[in-house]
Image (cartoon, coloured by chain):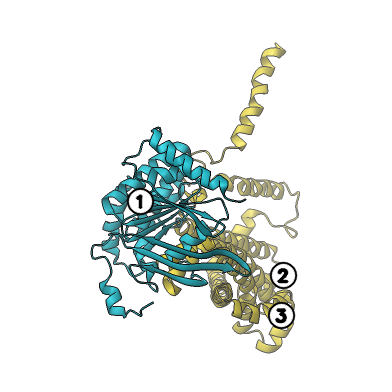
Chain colours: A yellow, B cyan
Amino acid sequence: MTDIAERPAASVWPRLFAALRRPTIPHGLPWIGWILPALIIVAWQTCSSLDWIADTVMPSPTAVAGAAWRLTLSGELPQNLGVSALRALAGLAVGGGAGLALGLLNGLSRLSFSATDTSVQMVRNVPHLALIPLVIVWFGIDEGAKLFIVALGVFFPIYLNTLHGVRSVDPRLIEMARSYGFRSWPLFQRVIWPGALPSILVGLRFALGLMWLTLIFAETIAAQSGIGYMAMQAREFMQTDVIVLSILLYALLGKGADSSVKVLERRTLAWRPDLQGPQ
Amino acid sequence: MTPVSAATERDALPSRPGAGARLTLRGVSKSFGAKMVLDGVNLHVPAGQFLTIVGRSGCGKSTLLRLIAGLDEPTAGRIEVEGVSEGRARLARIMFQEPRLLPWARVGANVAIGLGPAADPTQAFARSRDALATVGLGDRAGEWPSILSGGQKQRVALARALVSAPHVLALDEPLGALDALTRIEMQRLVEQVWLSNRFTAILVTHDVNEAVALGDRIVVIDRGAIAADIPVDLTRPRRRGSPEFARVEARILDYLLAAAH
């Protein structure tokens, strides 16, 4: 009797291990990553409904959804969301553009690298959020302050990864292309840029994380609109549902930004064996 | 050396694309810092000849090939392809030890690299396809290099070298990393394309068997200088098992073993 009962149980473990070690996810399960967040929300709702957590400490998911609906109808949420997104993208464009340009320049030119890298490394080691008081003195609390601080935050990961990407392009490939007459722009376009791109995209993913982090910080300290400002306002009136909503929005925006880079990787790095085949 | 004007240099080039060009080395030396790698090499290769260069590792044979292909310039002496020294890189193509395919370009685009940066895209497409067909990969133009085997990658590299119809093809041990069977297949392929195009071929190898199978002439390099220059007049295709083949092979081996370590 025990013998029969134990036999299938014994064979479950190897099968479970095999499933966990599969290099690809099973077909029909692209949403597998959303199971855990869904479970957490269910557990959270259950705890709130059973009054295990006080609403003033942590509002229930339905209360947060209600706040989202209320603020959407009033137009407050779309407006603040738009402002924050615009700030984030503008900061990314300015800081990321500068980091990309300097990274490419320093990766290609020894002279430029020697002249600027020491300075860059010194500035890099200053936590950029420590500059917020100074930035407020300079720009007040207008848009320039947020743009500056976000741009500074995203500059370094993109600069460092671009530099590393350009440096790590296989010199044998460059020699090969040169032997076929590729110089300057064609060489850059056909060999150096695609070779550096995987690393540049890693830098972009780091930068997106820092972009949101920096923006929340800047918005909670010095802003009159945006998600961070909305959360700070809600704190004044003890609207925990709006605070939690803001936090969840940052999580979703961060995830959205990361997913868009993944799409970008799939499109531009299709040649990589690890990005080929079924998704 | 008599100075030659640019116009006459151009007139002296082989007329048919891909036809062999003669190659002349006069007192060619190359040193890296204090280390002399090549010391006063003189060599004349007639147009269309298949020359193989053998030698122990570190003897300078790869350096010699890089100079011929125009990847490096000699410290002293002069290298001329069909009388031209400055623009010889345009006339010669090199096939490296590794395939050196761009992983982010599909096979067809990799072959089109061989036409240079100014190639017309539509024409490049057709010519790459033809070159791929020559090496037996006519249907693989749309694939990524990462899914090809080692031998197939070297075939693509060969197609890339051939697509511009070079007058000189320099081969730097391109078959060294392949397994024995693939290697023999590749040797046959190289011989085949050489026979149909008649470019001048310079193959560097440490494999004496390969040198005898392919070369019209074998040059043994030792300590940066030519130690022996041996014509091979066996009929093609050459049979590895034949006594004549073995005799030539043994002779080259003797030279190599006699060379100092």
Find the residue positioned furthest to the top: A1
Place of residue A101 in the rendered image (x, y in percent of width and height, measured from the top left):
54, 76
- Return the residue at label 3: A132
User: Is residue A184 at all visible to an observer of this figure?
Assistant: yes
Amino acid at dot 3: Ile
Distance, label 3 to label 1, CA atoms, is: 52 Å
Amino acid at dot 1: Gly
- Return the residue at label 1: B142
- Return the residue at label 2: A235
In this picture, residue B17 sits left or right of residue A180: left
Front residue of A97/A75: it is A97
Q: Is mark 1 on a helix, strand or loop?
A: loop
Q: Is mark 3 on a helix, strand or loop?
A: helix
Where is A261 relative to B189, above or below?
A: below
Front residue of A75/A107: it is A107
Distance, label 1 to label 2, CA atoms, is: 58 Å
Amino acid at dot 2: Arg
Front residue of A93/A181: it is A181
Where is A31 relative to A106, above or below?
A: above
Please name which of the two marks, 3 or 2, marks the residue nearer to the observer: 3
